Image (spheres, helix red, strand yellow):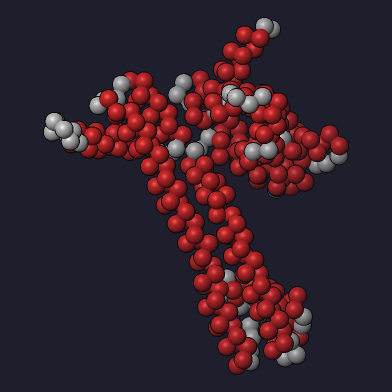
């Protein structure tokens, strides 16, 4: 196969698989078939957890898993092969681009999907023992539903803060478990016999779940429990507040980026077809709905026409 034909095939493969180019009917069919395959895989993993059902249809389950793994392996290799066609990778060598792609979150998720095949090469295992990995194939849906992109972006940017909050919570849990052990340990040795046994109570109390299977009976223990529950409300709410703020900031940042590009296209007073297609592509990449794009264009057009020349007043 000539280099030119190879490049054409690679471009077509990229257009079929990458989410920002799903305008063609073939691309949509391919992606919806892959979505259906992922959902069917998870349904099969759940169904096979019933031993009677699994034994009755064992060969069908094995055949379906084999076909699925073959498709997922082919898709993974195809994505690694064609990732060099992304616009941002044009100035980077193909080898470096592919290595960088393999370690991206999306590629690692694809790798999880074919992990049973890799494990089976070295170990003889029942498919049911790999059920958790098979259920994790749900993560592959992040390729096809772009709303996940914002979520992953927000989580990545707030990861350090979330980890910091979780570490502080862990400190409080250890302190709470130690306190309740020193107060209730001798009175309720079966429930609070050690700091390790008190961890369960500390976590349940800190998160305000309150199962009621471990309850302090002394006055001081109840006072400590009340304080820990109040502290827990604050710490449990913190990550949610941080994520909500970051979501708002991320959406605002994407909107500002789109508006900046619209203003740039309006420098000559109008937006031609090429400019509009570029803006549509950017809006799709930024997870902005076409209606919002059109609304922004209309609003910025009105503002653009309201600007008057300081010299002639037109």
Q: Classify residue 306 by image quadrant.
A: top left
Residue 129 shows in this picture: yes
Where residue 91 appears, as percent x and y from the top left, is 60, 24
Q: Residue at x 53, y 46 (%)?
A: 153
* Residue 290 makes an appearance in the image: no
The front one of 236 and 63 is 236
Residue 289 lies, in percent from the top left, at 37, 37
Front position in the image: 271 or 215? 271
Q: Position of residue 92 (x, y in %)?
A: 63, 26
**Residue at image coords 59%, 27%:** 89
Residue occupying image coordinates x 59% and y 65%: 165
Is residue 21 shown above or below 41? above
Q: Residue furthest top?
A: 2
Residue that protrudes farthest toward the bottom in the picture: 219
Which residue: 40% across, 26% down? 278
Query: Percent position (x, y) of residue 245?
Result: 44, 57
Furthest residue in direction front, as rendered: 311
Going by the image, does 81 lie left or right of 142?
Answer: right
300, 83: nearer the viewer:
300
Q: In the rendered image of this protein, does residue 169 appear above or below residue 157?
A: below
Q: Is residue 44 above or below residue 95?
A: below
- The quarter of the displayed image where residue 216 is located: bottom right
Q: Which quarter of the figure has residue 7?
A: top right
């Amino acid at each position: 196969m000539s280099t030119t034909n190879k490049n054409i095939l690679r471009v077509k493969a990229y257009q079929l698989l990458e989410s920002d180019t799903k305008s063609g009917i073939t691309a949509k069919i391919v992606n919806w078939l892959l979505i259906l395959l992922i959902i069917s895989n998870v349904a099969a993993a759940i169904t096979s957890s019933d031993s009677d059902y699994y034994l009755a249809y064992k060969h069908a389950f094995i055949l379906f898993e084999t076909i699925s793994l073959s498709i997922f392996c082919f898709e993974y290799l195809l994505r690694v092969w064609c990732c060099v066609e992304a616009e941002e990778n044009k100035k980077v060598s193909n080898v470096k681009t592919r290595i960088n792609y393999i370690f991206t979150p999306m590629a690692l998720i694809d790798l999880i999907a074919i992990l049973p095949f890799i494990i089976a090469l070295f170990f003889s295992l029942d498919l049911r023992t790999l059920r958790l990995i098979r259920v994790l194939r749900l993560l592959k849906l992040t390729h096809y539903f772009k709303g996940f992109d914002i979520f992953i972006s927000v989580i990545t940017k707030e990861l350090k803060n979330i980890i910091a909050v979780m570490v502080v919570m862990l400190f409080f849990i250890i302190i709470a478990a130690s306190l309740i052990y020193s107060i209730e340990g001798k009175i309720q040795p079966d429930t609070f016999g050690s700091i390790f046994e008190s961890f369960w109570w500390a976590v349940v109390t800190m998160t305000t779940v309150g199962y009621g299977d471990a309850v302090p009976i002394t006055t001081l223990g109840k006072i400590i429990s009340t304080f820990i529950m109040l502290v827990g409300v604050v710490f449990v709410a913190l990550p949610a507040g941080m994520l909500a703020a970051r979501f708002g900031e991320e959406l605002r940042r994407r909107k500002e980026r789109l508006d900046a590009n619209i203003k740039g296209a309006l420098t000559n007073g109008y937006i031609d077809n090429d400019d509009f297609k570029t803006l549509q592509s950017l809006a799709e990449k930024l997870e902005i709905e076409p209606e919002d794009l059109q609304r922004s264009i209309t609003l910025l057009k009105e503002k653009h026409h309201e600007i008057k020349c300081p010299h002639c007043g037109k």
